[in-house]
Image: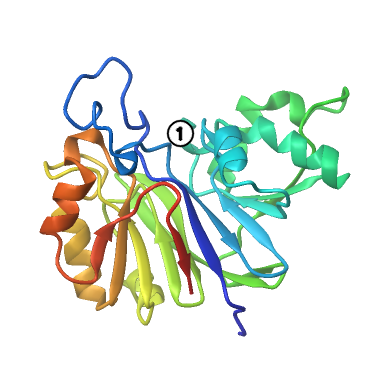
Amino acid sequence: MFVPPLKITFLGTGTSSGVPMIACDCEVCESIDEKDKRLRSSILVESDNTSIVIDTTPDFRTQMLRAQVKKLDAVLFTHPHKDHIAGLDDIKAFNYFHQQPMDVYANELTQNALKTEFHYAFTAQRYPGIPEINLHNIPDSTFLIGDIPVMPIWVWHLKMPVLGFRFGNFTYITDANRIEPSEMQKIEGSKIMVLNALRKAKHLSHYTLQEAIDVVDALKVPDAYFTHISHQLGKHAAINAELPIGKQLAFDGLVINC
């Protein structure tokens, strides 16, 4: 399937608490390096004709303003945790300026969470100013949003199924600590991969930095960027200097063309 040239913008690269973390005085949270300031994890995927956001974080409004996003065609959700869905209400600005509902794609688990958290957007009795949403199921096979083909990839966040996505040669996965062999096959051949790497110490439901490196190496993906980063990982510059060639930490505002 033809994939148009894509521009990927990292809207946020932090874990659920963001960096700096509230009330923390560690060296990362007090760093003056802008690359150590991380909003919650999300990306913007754009072709010349179509714009897609993956996850509406609690920082969604700030992220849209900071990236100067004037047009958004769809939202793709990875899973229902609050740091990935909390900003959905702010799609109402796009409703207002585009004069149409927002296409939102999610699995059943996430759809149920959206209907609970944003119940007012799904009621029969509607009032002005609430988000207008066209809710779509994410199929098991590749589907199109505008002119962008989207391949769903199922991963595990401890016991929760989470969706990653492949767009041509680019694969994005967050909040994972296990990928089944059948889903790994879907990633093979990617030229760029984004994967969560929370910290160096073992975690119950996220890849560590070394585990993320091992996944990328096993898949032989030439270029990798790590995201969903905690203040516990360390300063951006110091950790980046330790990484092997072809691997680096993503940072807010990073743009990749693929």
> In screen coordinates, is 209 left or right of 57?
left
* Pick the front one: 119 or 35: 35
Q: Residues within 10 Å of mark 1 (few under 14, many from 20)?
A: many
Q: How many marks?
A: 1
For image coordinates 76% across by 33% down, the residue present is 131
> In screen coordinates, is 155 left or right of 230?
right
**Farthest residue in the top direction?**
23
Question: x%, y% of residue 236?
Answer: 23, 46
Figure colour scheme:
rainbow
Residue position for label 1: 83
Does the image show residue 100?
no
- The amino acid type found where label 1 is placed reads Asp
> In screen coordinates, is 32 left or right of 152?
left
For image coordinates 54% across by 45% down, the residue present is 55
Question: x%, y% of residue 70?
Answer: 72, 48
The quadrant in which residue 164 appears is bottom left
* Pick the front one: 228 or 182: 228
Does the image show residue 84?
yes
**Farthest residue in the bottom direction?**
1
For image coordinates 19% across by 72% down, the residue present is 217
For image coordinates 35% across by 28% down, the residue present is 17
